Amino acid sequence: MSHLEERLENDLNKIRNRVEKQAELVEAAVTNAVHALQTGNAKLAYATVLNDLPINRTMREIDQICHKFIAIHLPSGGHLRLLSSVIRVNMELERIGDYAVTIAQEAAQLSKPPEGNMARELERMASETQLMLRQSIRAFNDLNAEMGRSTKLLADQMENNLDSIYTEMMSNQDRGKVKDILAVFVVFTQLKRVADQAKNLCEDAIFASTGEQKAPKVYKVLFIDEDNGCKSQMAEAIARRNYPDSGEYLSAGRQPAASLNPNLVSFLENRGQNLSNVQPSSLADLTERAISDQYVIVSLEGEVSSYLPEIPFHCTVLDWDMGPVPEAGDEQGFENLYRAISLQVKDLMELLRGEGAS
């Protein structure tokens, strides 16, 4: 190994050691913030807030060292991948530290630690989040792509749906507890963000080790109308045909028709889309989890709020006024409807995935 290669490896190891120590500080901050919340330890909460200052300073120091390394060594290949991953990890760790500060600040303001179902949900989610963070840090430190992939699966399996917590918070009639409930809800959202950043750490570990890029996100979209016999089915068919890699699509109706509109079936068959085995679906048959999993819910007939008593917390809803279903034999009417829905679907999917969505 030449002197320059030896210097490069030494400088790189110094950066990795600095990131490893930063990760230890951040992991401790999350652990202490959660413990302060669960035990009502205000002193620990305030100490966690102040201990974020060294984390911020180290973040800036690592950033400077990385840019200096690039200027001196002009890295390429695996070294460049690692440096770009380190820069991202550095920002992600700093954000996790900020989330720990928010949790600690909320802990310091609580009149007493969470109790009952809130406490149990907090314990579950905090344990899962901390496990995921710990493993994602280890995956990056060891450049272990397989551990990164397995830890990513934890994020998909985690029941991080906040809708039930949000519903419980809204149903609480004791206004004296509203401040505490709101504070705990903020904590849940911060833990969810820690888990999201831990997943990003896994992506960075995989990229640094293998060069494998993060797969584009696939968005779940639900189209609804009164009977799921025409317009919502057309929207689903258009989305499936034109953007198969960008989303997972469903359609449903309030009161499903006995069968699809025959004019729709023949119209789409002329365009190479076969709906002969498709039957209208009922919105009522979708589970609460299936609905809350949707990223976007689109109504093609009236407002989404008229179909769902509660809009899931994480869902975005859109109301597309597509007008009445064309009469039988109105080929031009179906053509106009098809074009109008196609444009709306195109705008939505390009907004979600960018130009060139497929």
Image (cartoon, rainbow, N blue to C red):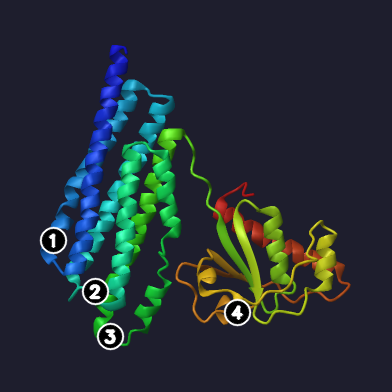
- Point out residue 94 in the picture as x, y percentages from the top left corner: 28, 48
Q: Residue furthest bottom?
A: 173
Location of mark 2 (residue): 114
Amino acid found under the numbered disc labelled 1: Leu
CA gap between label 1 and label 2 equals: 16 Å
Q: Is residue 16 above or below residue 259?
A: above
Q: Secondary structure at mark 2?
A: loop
Which residue is denoted by mark 3 in the rendering? 175
Which quadrant of the rendered structure holds the N terminus?
top left
Q: Residue at x 40, y 44 (%)?
A: 148
Density class for disc 1 (Cα within 10 Å; few <14, some 14-19, many ≥20) is: many
- Residue 303 falls in which quadrant of the image? bottom right
Q: CA distance from mark 1 to mark 4?
A: 48 Å
Tell me the kind of residue under disc 2: Pro
Q: Identify the residue at image location x=17%, y=49%.
A: 53
Q: Are marks 2 and 4 in contact (CB under 8 Å)?
A: no
Distance (Cα) linking label 3 and label 2: 16 Å
Q: Amino acid at mark 4?
A: Ala
Residue indicated by mark 1:
44
Label located before the other in sequence (1 or 4): 1
